[in-house]
Structure formats: structure tokens, C-alpha cells
Image: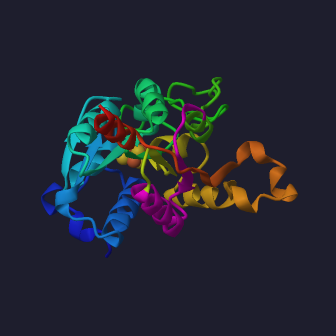
Amino acid sequence: MKGEKFINPSRIPSIWCPGCGNGIVLHSVLTALEELNYTKDNVIFVSGIGCSSRSSTYTIFDNIHTLHGRAIPIATAIKLVRPDKKVIVMTGDGDSLAIGGNHIIHAARRNIDLTVIIFNNSIYGMTGGQFSPLTPSGKRATTSQFGNIENQFDAMKLLQGAGATYLARIGTYFFTQMTRYIKTALQHEGFGVVEAITQCPVYYGRLNKMATPSDMLLWQKDNLVFKDRLSQSNIEGMDEKLLIGEFVNLNAPSYLQKRKALLERI
Ligand code: SF4
């Protein structure tokens, strides 16, 4: 299986529940790395806290499993001192957009050369199923038993506004397309983010009438709409649906390119 050579067998089995989508996202990242000929020596993973943030610890790559929400500043520091390394942040929706929300918008503004994979399971899984900034309005979590009354972020719009130069959203149902977007993000110079919609059957699924992992994948099939294939018929009822695809792919000077130019000038 592609990407398998990057798994650290001594760390298996994972802590993930049966049917969790985190393994699909990790498999996609490792497949992309193998297809782009990355090796153990030129990649560093940084992750925060949460079920998805455990992903990097299952690999043979150098990795830092750091404080909740703080993966991006640590990844930034690593990239500044080791610009030759591919630095990848593995983070959840709560980790990146709640406690880490401040860091991610400034990383986007700086266009710092990082690849960020946001595992969006719409909930805090590890800490018991609380709602996160990406829990859709009206949906149930353990802390919103009667429906979430907060509005959710649209991570793509938020990060586009903040200045990210590569942005894509996709779901675990679309593995091949996910791997393609991750490969593009890895090759991108600047701040690249792939939001991976993934299933947490244990909390989000059970609380929202999707009893099994396959129910959650079928929900993705029916409700994730490629933005380039949007037609009048599927715009109707869009409130339950979510746009996927590439949202931003810009060539703009990255932080490291600007820093290099500055150092040459002075
Ligand atoms: Fe996956 Fe949810 Fe279990 Fe966490 S709690 S491992 S996100 S299924």
C-alpha cells in the first residue's frame, strides 16, 4: 500500500476508534509524500492536541506533538531555521481554529511556507464531543444537545481573507482527489491548507443521526459539492451542503522568499 513505508509499526495500533476517518487522511498525506519522492530525512511533522494530531506520531518522520493550538508557531520556528525541510502541520478543527485560531490567521497573512492539513470532524473528539468552531449551526454535540446555536467558520473564506495562497477542501469519501490536493499543497511555495472533512462516528455521527461510519461517508457523497460543478439544481438546499474543491491557488512571494530578498539587500 502506498505510504505504508512511512508508518512506524512500533506505534501501532493507533488510539483511533473503529471507523474513524483520521486514518484515511493520514493515508492520503503519506501517499502524497511517497508519490512526490519525499524521504524520512526531508520532512518534519508538527501537530497539536486532539485525535487527529496523534497522526504524525504514527509515522517514521521527525515530529513534534506539541501544545493544544500551538502547532503553527512551532512549525514556523522550525521552517525559519530549517528552510530545506518540508514542514507539515497536522491539526484538528478545534486545535487550528479555536485555540489556534490566532496563529493560523497570522501564518496565512505572512504566507509562511507551511503545509497545513486540517482534519475537520466537526467536533472535539478526544475531549468528549464538544462543539467546535466548525460544528455546523443546529447540529448536536455533547455541549449542544439541543442543537448548536453558534455560527460555524467557513475555514476557506476565513483563510482566504487572511491571505493564504493555497486553499482546498475535500472529504475522506474522495480519497484520490484529496491526495491530489495534498500533493499540490506540498509543492506550493507559501501557506497552503487542505481542509479534510472526516468522520467521527463515535461523537458527531451518533449525535447527528449517522449511526455508522458508512452513513457518514454517504453523507459526504450527497452533501459535498464540487464548486466547479455547481449548478442551479444543487444550489437549492445548499444550507445542508458544503462546497469542496480548490478555493485559492495563487503565486505570491512567500515569507521565506521575501526574507531571502531582504537579507540579500541588506
Ligand atoms: Fe476518531 Fe471521533 Fe474516535 Fe476521535 S473520538 S478517534 S475523532 S472516532
Write the residue at 26% across / 48% down: 45
Displayed quadrant of residue 162 = top right
Tell which of 251 and 165 is nearer to you. 251
Residue 107 horizontal/vertical position (percent)? 42, 33
User: In this orientation, which residue lies closer to the viewer: 68 or 150?
Assistant: 68
Q: Is residue 15 visible?
A: no
Q: Residue at x 55, y 52 (%)?
A: 168
Instruction: Name the residue at 74% across, 62% down.
Output: 229
Res. 177 visible in picture: yes
The stretch drawn in magenta includes residue 124: no
* Ligand 1 rendered quadrant: top left
Q: Position of residue 204 (x, y in %)?
A: 52, 42
Residue 150: image location, x then y, percent? 63, 24
| Magenta-tinted stretch | 161-187
- Relative to 136, 2 lies left or right: left
**From the viewer's perspective, is residue 31 above or below residue 234?**
below
Q: Given the current orientation, which residue lies at the most extreme left position?
A: 10
